[in-house]
Amino acid sequence: MSHAYLERVKRYLLDFQDRLCQSLAQADGHADFVEDAWTREDGGGGRSRVITEGAVFEKGGVNFSHVFGENLPPSASAARPELAGRSFHAVGVSWVMHPHNPHLPTTHGNVRFFIAEKEGEAPVWWFGGGIDLTPYYPMLEDVIHWHHTAREACAPFGDDVYPRYKRWCDEYFYLKHRDETRGVGGLFFDDVNEEGFEQSFAFQQAVAEAFVPAYLPIIEKRQNMPYGERERDFQNYRRGRYVEFNLVYDRGTLFGLQSGGRTESILMSMPPVAHWAYQYQPEEGSPEAELYAHYLHPREWLEEADRA
């Protein structure tokens, strides 16, 4: 695989970052993204774009990075021993949006490409990424819309693609120490290369392009719903789960820190405010209890909707 493939992916991701920021800033209607370009001493760099104190978004970021080097970080080489002794390039866009309104879900996505090379041997490469949704006061119709959009993005690539990557998302965004999912899932994929470069790249683009039509209709429906101190306190308590997952389990966070990435950009995904409470239990029959009872364990959302 020549570096022409890497450059194609990089051009797409830079353009996607531009378009995604434009769509999200337009949805916010008040604030815009501020760009912060950075370089990595050991090779590469990126451009971080952050929005704060908007009309819709309390904090959000859309980051592009391209890092490369001669030695893989331990999080990669331990999981893939065949990569030892190879140089690498990792390029991707990741985004996390934390709205003000507790009725609006936090959301996350990323799309990435990795290639490791060694003279005299074939390159090792793959695509990865996904999109997922973390509501605090979920609406079933929003969850169904989110998953329907994800399934439509996967449909051209085979009937088994959505169920496979939906299940992987449920398993990946799972807090073992809490026995709960981080949210209501979506898609998660990694090590995608079995169909060749063109098909794999097309799939990555399909997932990336599905995010705006999946998320923006939820913003339009929920951004003006009234809320008070109770809802805000619960939102900040549940944001704590986001912090726990990212610091304990998230592969991207670990790879970024171990590869000498820019800490400010890696931790951009953290919410602006989060609370923890000892032995919190939602009041029986409350909207908060509804989240725990029906939304924090894997469900076949679309199959249930079809049967209803």
Image (cartoon, helix red, strand yellow):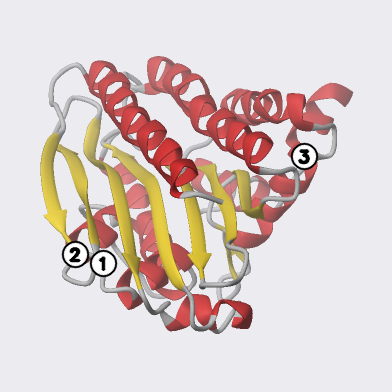
User: In which quadrant is the C terminus drawn?
Assistant: top right
Label 2 sits on a secondary structure element that is: loop
On the image, the x and y values in percent for residue 278 come to: 38, 75
Name the amino acid type tagged 1. Answer: Gly
Task: Quote the CA–CA distance across marks 2 and 1.
Answer: 7 Å
Q: To which residue does mark 3 refer?
A: 161
Res 282 seen here = no
Decide which of tag 1 and tag 3 comes sooner along the chain: 3
Decide which of tag 2 and tag 1 comes sooner along the chain: 2
Residue at 79% over, 42% down: 163
- Indicate whether 175 appears above or below 61: below
Q: To which residue does mark 1 refer?
A: 261
Task: Quote the CA–CA distance across marks 2 and 3.
Answer: 36 Å
Disc 1 and disc 3 in contact, CB within 8 angstroms: no
Residue at 26% over, 36% down: 100
- Nearer the observer: mark 1 or 3; the answer is 1
Res 23 seen here = yes
Name the amino acid type tagged 2. Answer: Arg
- Nearer the observer: mark 2 or 3; the answer is 2
